[in-house]
Image (tube, coloured by chain):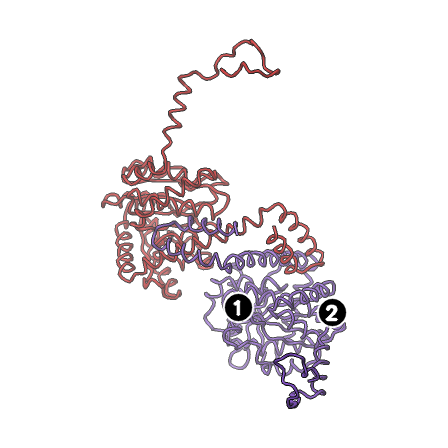
Chain colours: A purple, B red
Amino acid sequence: MENQHKKSALSEVNGVNQPDSLSNAVAKRIQQKRKVIPSASELIEAIKKGDKIALSRAITLVENTNPEHLERANEVINGCLPFANKSVRIGITGVPGVGKSTFIEAFGTYLTSIGKKVAVLAVDPSSSISHGSILGDKTRMEELVKNENAFIRPSASGDSLGGVARKTRESIILCEACGFDTIIIETVGVGQSETAVHSMVDFFLLLKIAGAGDELQGIKRGIMEMADTIVINKADGDNISKAKLAKTEFNRALHLFPAKNSGWNPKVTTCSAYEKTGIDAIWSIISDYFTLVKENHFFEKKRQDQNQFWMIETINEQLKNNFYSHPEILKLLDEQKKAVQNNELSPFAAAKNLLDKYFKI
Amino acid sequence: MENQHKKSALSEVNGVNQPDSLSNAVAKRIQQKRKVIPSASELIEAIKKGDKIALSRAITLVENTNPEHLERANEVINGCLPFANKSVRIGITGVPGVGKSTFIEAFGTYLTSIGKKVAVLAVDPSSSISHGSILGDKTRMEELVKNENAFIRPSASGDSLGGVARKTRESIILCEACGFDTIIIETVGVGQSETAVHSMVDFFLLLKIAGAGDELQGIKRGIMEMADTIVINKADGDNISKAKLAKTEFNRALHLFPAKNSGWNPKVTTCSAYEKTGIDAIWSIISDYFTLVKENHFFEKKRQDQNQFWMIETINEQLKNNFYSHPEILKLLDEQKKAVQNNELSPFAAAKNLLDKYFKI
């Protein structure tokens, strides 16, 4: 308010002073709060010390689509990279209704009980549309969410699976640098999200229930082939015998697939996440897997391949984005589409016209 | 030789005249032959008159990767476009051993006997590697190859499926402008070639034999789901009852798939290409299909969608080619790959570096 008595002809000379809309105390508090936003190096240091609040903030930064934040996000990630990679990454998928949340609650709690630090992330591109993220409702993991050795983060939102996948991949790095040694990536059986998750984890667990009748769907979409272990959940009460039967059937189905490059024979097991039975056996299977793939160096090779894959995927995605978001291309694209529709131009000639234009811009 | 007496110090003055390596008569013949290469408009006119030699030449032009010929090829295709689209396009696939060549021979001969003009093209990206094109050996279609209402062309070669697919798509246009009303596109059950063929035909026929045991493979790769009709071949002699049993089984399997957008219920039928039985029934099924999809306008919609698909595919393919063939990018790509491998850089940061460089070039 001190600047109100300006020398401009437009200024109200000797006008009535307006009351301050913001008390000095409030302004100071806001200033302080702004100042508190940590720098990249502060975030990195805090994350390395296991600070979960810093981890949350860094993930929020990674998820932010503001280009201004992108640079700082990259700085944090690259700073965390040397301290990452020291975990096991487990993907968990299953169609709605198989009890994924209950399973992760039981499985994650078991892992912390044997000294593991567990981070749970999710890849659910639908959550940005439906606003109903599978992990959005954290109350479904009541116990785990309060556990100090666990960190739960709902799915990033984004307009594309590629975007969500990138954010999750980068969040894994941050979680690992923060000391989480067991990373669980949850996904729902929708679209291509399993393939995306499969390409960012070391071990892929398919959750099933007996008699769901979606076997063909699973085979067709290649999900069963990706599984390192199939867990038949809800093996409790009247369901136990059905679950055992399903186990035999899935075992038979798995034999139809060619041998895996990992040298691992996929296993089938049953559990009850609700009664917390069979959970230790699942961890025992997973441990066997990691012993094998670390011995035969498949573990390392797969991570390298995944890194290459994500680099190339990101490039290809960006090349397309750049092309299809260019205003001049969008205009020409419309024209060329119409010409193709009217049989005046072959699709290939239209493509050539568009590309010629693009590379001249 | 007339220019030999040059005024240069290096020229042999009054040297002995060398004999002509080429007689004037030969030179004239070559000149004439060169002159005979028809212009784009000459090709278009000849094709429209049903000239099979002009059609062959135009396809050769389309298959030529020389950039110099590309323009003329595009001219021919765009000139033929208004006269194309008046055919039915049938895709035929089946693993080696189901008798594809014999089937096409019998089926194509039947079609010409009821007044159709039949063009047979092939999509076989492996042929460029193995030099063993499925249609390379035309003697396997002895009858059809001599038939004046048939035109058979082996698979184009090319380093990628995308390249082969483009050439085949363009050849379809040329065949149609030449008056061929039934286009058969053959492909072998390898890699993604079925998907490519499926996206360029109106009707997709899956050829099978009884008891081959590759059902799971077919389901998994989505080929069975693409089929508008499954034909069980070799239903002759001792095989008839087995083929009938297979028909029942495939019918049951088809019911597991969701309804098709075309409104068509896929059919299963048996035939013996060798004994030429059941062929007319197949054509009757195909005719029913075309009656349905022309009535409900799916036919037109699908062709439009396919055109869009190929336009976008071509663009995306070219965008990648341009990026990954750039010498400066190739150099940087190598460096960035190593940095990612050594965990100095996240795959996303590496991708960003490469893209930043690319868009500055």
Is B147 placed left or right of A22 in the picture? Answer: left
| Label 1 CA crowd tier, 10 Å (few <14, some 14–19, many 20+) | few
Q: Position of residue A270 (x, y in %)?
A: 57, 73
Q: Nearer the viewer, residue A63 or A91?
A: A63
Mark yes or no: residue B236 visible. no
Q: Position of residue A355 (x, y in %)?
A: 48, 50
Q: Position of residue B210 (x, y in %)?
A: 38, 53
Q: Secondary structure at mark 1?
A: loop
Mark yes or no: residue A132 visible. yes
Whether A348 is drawn above or below B251: the answer is: above
How far apart, in angstroms, are the residues tagged by discs 1 and 2?
Answer: 28 Å
User: At 40% from the left edge and 64% from the top edge, which residue is drawn?
Assistant: B257
**Residue beneath disc 2:** A44
**Residue beneath disc 1:** A159
Mark 2 chain: A
User: Are the residues at dot 1 and dot 2 in contact (C-beta closer than 8 Å)?
Assistant: no
Whether B81 is drawn above or below A14: the answer is: above
Q: Earlier in the sequence, mark 1 or mark 2?
A: 2
Q: Nearer the viewer, residue A178 or B106?
A: A178
Q: Position of residue B235 (x, y in %)?
A: 32, 50
Q: Nearer the viewer, residue A285 or A133?
A: A133
Is A88 placed left or right of A126 in the picture? Answer: right
Q: Secondary structure at mark 2?
A: helix
- Residue A277 is drawn in which quadrant? bottom right
Residue flagged by tag 1: what amino acid is it?
A: Asp
Residue flagged by tag 2: what amino acid is it?
A: Ile
Is A335 placed left or right of B11 in the picture? Answer: left
